[in-house]
Amino acid sequence: MRILLVEDEMLLRTSLARLLQRAGFEVQAVGSAGEALATQPAFAADLLITDWLLQGDCDGLELARRLRRTTPAIQVIVITGLLAGDARPQLEPEALGATLLEKPFLFADLLAAIERIRA
Amino acid sequence: MSGAAPGASAAKPLRRTAVLVARVRGGLWVIVGLTAAMALSECTLRPGVVPLLDASQAYTIGTLLGALWLLHARPTQACAIAVGLLGLTVSCLAMARVGILSNDVPVQGYIALAMATAAMVPWGVRVQALAITVVGATYWWNVSAVPGRTAVLTSREVSSMVVLAAAALYITWVLDRHSRQEARERRHQHALRGELERRVSERTHALVAANTALTAEAHASHRLRDQLLVISDSFPGYLAYVGTDLRYVWVNQAYEKYWLLPRTEIVGKHMRELHDRSVFRDLQTHIDAALAGVQCTTEMSVPQAGAGSRSFEITFFPHREPNGTLAGFIIFGVETTARHASEARLHRTERLAALGTLAAGIAHEINNPAASILSTAEMVRATLDDFDRTLLDESLAAIAAEAQRCGQIVRSVLRFAREEPAERTPQLLFPVLQRATELLRGEVALAGATIHVDCTATPAPVAIVASEILQVVLNVTTNALRAGARTVTLRTAARPGTLALLVEDDGRGMTEAERARVFDPFFTTTRARGGTGLGLSVCHSILTQHGGTIELQSTVGVGTTVIIELPLPAATAETGPAAIASTGT
């Protein structure tokens, strides 16, 4: 399974990338939506794991929408540090069919989410 | 008369003399009249002399004059005179029948003429006496003039009588001077009394008119007083009028109920008598101010006998007379206990709402490093088997740095929320705006919007509690983002005496009806998305505490501008950093 990881927190990005690689996934880790859009045509990921909030005018959800245009089958896991509540529109990730994972999370939780998507 | 006063008994003889003199004079008039009639009769009866009037002419004239007189005389007087005339005429005719009077002699005519003349003139009584004299003299003369009878009086005797009578009349006239004077005085006094009565009557009329007007006025003022009483009694607040001696002049029903005393017992009491010593001491400053002519308002809490206390907002209005002297003051009190309770409840709710907004911002800030720490730690654990010292060292250093970042975030929040003194300190607005954009980074990114901060125009410090103003900026900006704004500009502008902070957005704007209610607690257009409706009411209360204002200008489809004004300290010579602009996402 090919995973495209988009996270602007460098430490989280590198550690998650290593863990995913060790778990046997092929991972491409980038720090912004622009890089992700540039990487995808060549990489052709099956799963997008993206931070909701990204630098620039394109957030994780928007990125997922754009990738869906070229790769309609791509699965999406959105990770976020935002608290559930009025600051976070709850319905948007669901509308995308994306799985939402709240920071901080255990790697096991991420693996479980990936497994659910695979099944 | 023995009991009469000395003055009265002295006046009596004088009056008696006057009456006597009047009678004597009447008698003398009789003699004068008799003499004149004799002269007349002699002249008409002399042989060869034609009588002045014949009998029928005399009758006619007499009847006409009598009729004229009757038209003018008072009824009773007229009757008496008519009866008298008739009687005299009948007796004259009777005398002529029996031969005492001659039919040839127009005695009756003389009688009628004399009586009528007498009746025509105002001094009637005297002239009547004269007329009777004339009749008598004529009779005597006629008797003597009838052939074969001896004359009773000779013409010399008649002339003497005339002279004597005239002399006597003059003497009595002279003697009567005193009583004439008295009569004049009486007439004068009578006139005076008349004038006096007229004036009294005029004055009475004026007084009656004035009295009527006064009664009407009293009526109107009574009605006004009643209306005032009804209004003040149905008014739920406390109203009293206190004189400069600090005694109650008037109180409304609320006062009666508060003190459980009838109005009549409160009025007249000194304020000190009703109020507790401590309460009165608290009121004293304001009373002094009111007595100095200054209106003032105070909020005070009055401990209750049972438990707790009631709070009142009391205003003292000095009352001045039209000439400027202070007459007293009006006390106007409103109980604020219930309002305070609901304000406290609202304040708690506001604090919770504020906490929620802050918590959301903090959560994002902390969750990110926490996720990094967790993930890195897990990664290190996973790679422990193929031990890589450099990776381990780097990872642990990174974990330490992230943990420190968490600590910094918490500390910075605490600095705003707790460690910072609650009192307002003069400071620049820019750091607060910057902090706000940092905390809002998540939401701004979510909304795909941009925030611009522009403080170039106004580097002046304002006295604020930074955490509270931060809260205001967070709330207002969050609203802008929720209204679909793509760009939010936080801009400061200097205005006379105030520093304005304008938060401009290009969101969907709001209708006039919405705009009118935005500061109402729990009014929200985003309840479905979790809006509490407390944001702007919190802002309003914070700015009111800062002595500032907040208002909104909005156009549907164009955007909204929130204008926040904070008072500038009196002297703002200090200048802050020059230009700081623009920060995105």
Image (spheres, coloured by chain):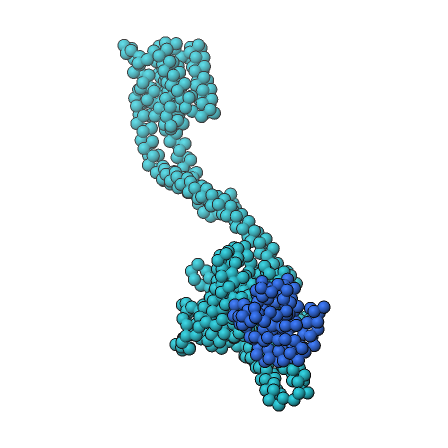
Count of numbered marks? 0
Looking at this view, name the residue that lies furthest to the left. B48
- Left or right: B182 with respect to B308? left
Quarter where residue B20 is shown? top left
Q: Is residue B569 above or below residue B236?
A: below
Where residue B317 appears, as percent x and y from the top left, is: 50, 63
> Which residue is at 31% across, 18% downward?
B40
Residue drawn at x 38%, y 16% is: B64
Q: Residue B292, can we see it?
A: no
Identity of the residue drawn at 55% across and 49% down: B223
Taking A45 as reference, is B408 above or below it?
Answer: below
Residue B364 image point, x, y percent: 60, 74
The image position of residue B416, as x and y in percent, is: 55, 77
Q: Taking B283 as reference, is B75 above or below it?
A: above
Q: Position of residue B387 (x, y in %)?
A: 65, 89
Q: Residue furthest front?
A: A42
Left/right placement of residue B101 relative to residue B231 reads: left
Q: Nearer the viewer, residue B338 or B182?
A: B338
Quarter of the figure with residue B400: bottom right
Residue B556 position (above or below residue B419): above
Question: Hey, which quadrant is residue B150 in on the image?
Answer: top left
User: Would residue B458 be found to the left or right of residue A101 on screen?
Assistant: left
Q: Colour of chain A?
A: blue
Closer to the camera, B426 or B217? B426
Residue at (66% x, 72% y) in the render: A1
Provide the letter of the chain coloured cyan. Answer: B
Q: Is residue A70 visible?
A: yes
Nearest the viewer among B117 and B23 is B117
Residue situated furthest bottom in the rendering: B389
* Closer to the camera in the image, B498 or B339: B498
